[in-house]
Image (cartoon, rainbow, N blue to C red):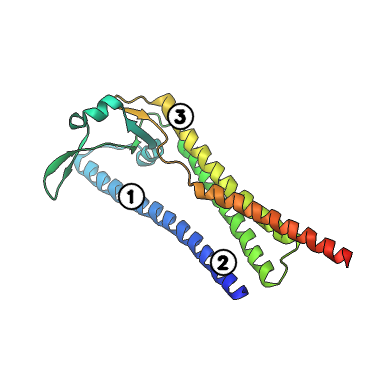
Amino acid sequence: MKKKFNIYCGLLIAAIVFGIGVNMFQTAYYMIQGGKAGIEMAKKEKIMGKKKKPFENLQRVYRMTPVEMMPKEDYLMEMNAGDSIVNLKTGEKMPMMTMQGIVLPKNGGNRMFIMQGIGHLSFALIIVFLVAFIKLVISVNKGRIFEKSMETQLAWGGWAVLAMYMLKWVGTLYTYFLNVQEFEFEAYRLEIVQTPDIALLYSGLGMLLIGQIFKIGRQMKEEQELTI
């Protein structure tokens, strides 16, 4: 039984590491592509003799603002007159509906710093969850199942996952309300298109529920020992 339990735990940790790795790979990929584009642009500007302000590229990055939107009804009915994109394989110019994008306002504010702060907090919560989960696995392998430490680790893990879910909502709502204050597009209305993964909410509540089940089991065990 413990062998199967350890296999499932190993698969869960592997899935978590894989998810973090994919996110890190995507971030690194975009940074590399952005760096290449910046180098090419710098070469062209040097050839043209254009002088550039110090840290201009870095300032451009911090001005990047994600927006989520849906087309207004009248625009949706007239898609042929809206945005378009060319399929290079066929040469066909097709109507296109934009739902997510990046804009670069002249004054990007400090939202990028705040979003980075939220990202750091989320990473810290992942560490808390992993520590609690590893301690949980160790407790099970040592046979310390109906002990208070089990409930503590489940509680730490559950609250960490719930906090991650709430932080994602904070970032989503923060971006949305700032966008509503700063932007109004002719053909699109600002909306929240992509919401935080509801699986985080289910997982966090599930861990807290399991912790309570273990607590009830421990109390019943203690009562039986007292009766005997």
State left or right for residue 208 relative to residue 203: right
Q: Which residue is mark 3?
A: 178
Q: Quadrant of residue 195?
A: top left
Q: Is residue 26 above or below residue 92?
A: below
Mark yes or no: residue 94 visible. yes
Reading the image, the residue beneath label 1 is: 35
Tag 3's secondary structure?
Answer: helix
Mark 1 to mark 3: distance in Å? 28 Å
User: Which quadrant would the N terminus be assigned to in this image?
Assistant: bottom right
Which quadrant would residue 188 be assigned to in this image?
top left
Density class for disc 3 (Cα within 10 Å; few <14, some 14-19, many ≥20) is few
The residue beneath circle 2 is: 9
Secondary structure found at label 1:
helix
Closer to us: mark 3 or mark 2? 2
Which amino acid lies under the numbered mark 2 shown in the image of this protein?
Cys
Query: Image point 51% across, 50% down: which residue?
Result: 199
